[in-house]
Image (spheres, grey):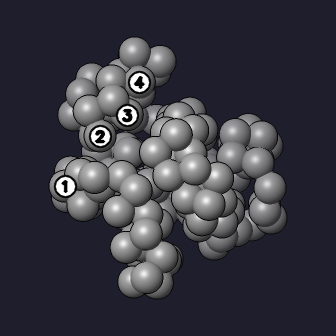
């Protein structure tokens, strides 16, 4: 996971704590939405995933405000799926991102980096699995 955090820090200009918490929040959503077998496959492909999820902050109440305004960029950032489902996933992550001092719009910047890392670590199957989670509500 050190490689993923390094990529996020260098590409997005966030600090290490923000990178860990933001990526952890996205993977936490995956953990909540995937069945035990699928999550086991995901975590098996990416050692340290459970530790990273532990770094995800609790979401702040009301943090998803203004999220609808970024729907268009969200759709392009993660590819595929329905707009309403994506907004649900992004809204779930937005509260955690706000707790980290990050704008809700950063969710759409983290997602492609996380998805590409997942593909590098676990191949297309893992990327597709994670992509389906990110595209659901």
Spatial CA distance of label 1 from label 2 is: 9 Å
Instruction: Kindly identify which residue carries mark 4.
Output: 7
Instruction: Kindly identify which residue carries mark 3.
Output: 4
Label 4 Cα crowd, 10 Å radius (few <14 / some 14-19 / many 20+): some
Give the residue at x 37% y 73%.
40
User: Can residue 66 be seen from the camera position used here?
Assistant: yes
Give the residue at x 24% y 61%.
50
Label at residue 51: 1
- The mark that comes first in sequence, 1 or 2, is 2
- The mark that comes first in sequence, 2 or 4, is 2
Instruction: Using the image, determine if residue 43 lies above or below residue 11.
Output: below
Spatial CA distance of label 3 from label 1 is: 13 Å
Give the residue at x 74% y 66%.
84
Label 1 Cα crowd, 10 Å radius (few <14 / some 14-19 / many 20+): few
The reply to whether dot 1 and dot 2 touch (C-beta < 8 Å) is: yes
Residue closer to the observer: 60 or 49: 49
């Amino acid at each position: 996971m050190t490689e993923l955090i390094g990529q996020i820090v260098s590409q997005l200009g966030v600090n290490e704590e923000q990178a860990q918490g933001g990526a952890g929040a996205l993977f936490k959503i995956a953990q909540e939405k995937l069945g035990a077998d699928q999550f086991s496959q995901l975590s098996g492909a990416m050692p340290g995933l459970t530790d990273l999820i532990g770094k995800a902050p609790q979401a702040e109440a009301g943090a998803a405000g203004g999220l609808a305004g970024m729907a268009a960029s969200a759709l392009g950032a993660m590819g595929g799926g329905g707009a309403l489902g994506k907004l649900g996933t992004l809204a779930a992550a937005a509260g955690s991102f706000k707790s980290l001092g990050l704008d809700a719009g950063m969710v759409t910047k983290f997602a492609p980096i996380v998805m590409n890392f997942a593909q590098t670590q676990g191949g297309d199957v893992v990327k597709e699995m994670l992509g389906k989670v990110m595209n659901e509500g």
